[in-house]
Amino acid sequence: MSSDAEKASLFQRVADRVSYLMGTPGNIAFWLVVVIAWTAVFATGIVGPNAQILPSWFTGPAFNFPLNLVTTVAELFIGFLVGAASNRSERHLENTLDQIKAVELGLSEAIRQNTDITSAIKNDTVLLDEIHKHVTAITPDAGAFDPKDKS
């Protein structure tokens, strides 16, 4: 996994980190509080069109312009983040598929070796049976092996 992180470009690393942080409950709660506070400030009249605290373009009749601008730009960046997250997911899927292919190749090689060994054992067994028949034909006692006999 560290080799993947080293291969990733700076953009990919930043996009991965930001897309992770954007989905955390803390980030969602923060922006929920900001939007509620923004709405409450203007809905209660604490800041109005004649307020000296903020610039007039910010507090004018179109006070929602900055909020709309921020949300529009945020939506644009969220689209890029979704694309980056999708690309990250695709990279991980490709890595997983490559690992599966490697395992399949290893298994097919192991099965081939097992088949070769099984065939060799079968051939050797047939040959041993043939040798056993010849030996017992030459010496009739050779086929009667008694493990208890220690002579």
Image (spheres, rainbow, N blue to C red):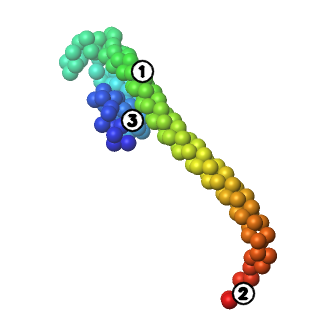
Looking at this view, name the residue that lies furthest to the left: 52
Expressed as whole percent of the image width and height from the top left, the position of residue 93 reads 49, 34
- Is the residue 56 above or below the residue 27 in the image? above
- Circle 3/circle 1 CB separation < 8 Å: no
Q: In front: 19, or 10?
A: 10
Q: Sort mark 1 into few (<14), some (14-19) or many (20+) by Cα contacts within 10 Å.
A: few
Residue carrying label 2: 148
Expressed as whole percent of the image width and height from the top left, the position of residue 39 reads 38, 24
Expressed as whole percent of the image width and height from the top left, the position of residue 76 reads 38, 18
Q: Sort mark 3 into few (<14), some (14-19) or many (20+) by Cα contacts within 10 Å.
A: few
Q: CA distance from mark 3 to mark 2?
A: 75 Å
For marks 2 and 1, the one nearer the N-term is 1
Q: Residue at x 33, y 37 (%)?
A: 5
Q: Is residue 30 left or right of residue 55?
A: right
- Circle 3/circle 2 CB separation < 8 Å: no
Q: At numbered mark 1, what does the secondary structure look like: helix, strand or loop?
A: helix
The tag on residue 20 is 3
Q: In front: 112, or 51?
A: 112
Q: Is residue 37 left or right of residue 105?
A: left
Residue carrying label 1: 79
Q: Residue at x 74, y 82 (%)?
A: 146
Tell me the kind of residue under disc 3: Tyr
Q: Quadrant of residue 57?
A: top left
Q: At numbered mark 3, what does the secondary structure look like: helix, strand or loop?
A: helix
For marks 3 and 1, the one nearer the N-term is 3
Tell me the kind of residue under disc 2: Lys
Q: Is residue 18 visible?
A: no
Q: In front: 115, or 90?
A: 115
Q: CA distance from mark 2 to mark 1?
A: 83 Å
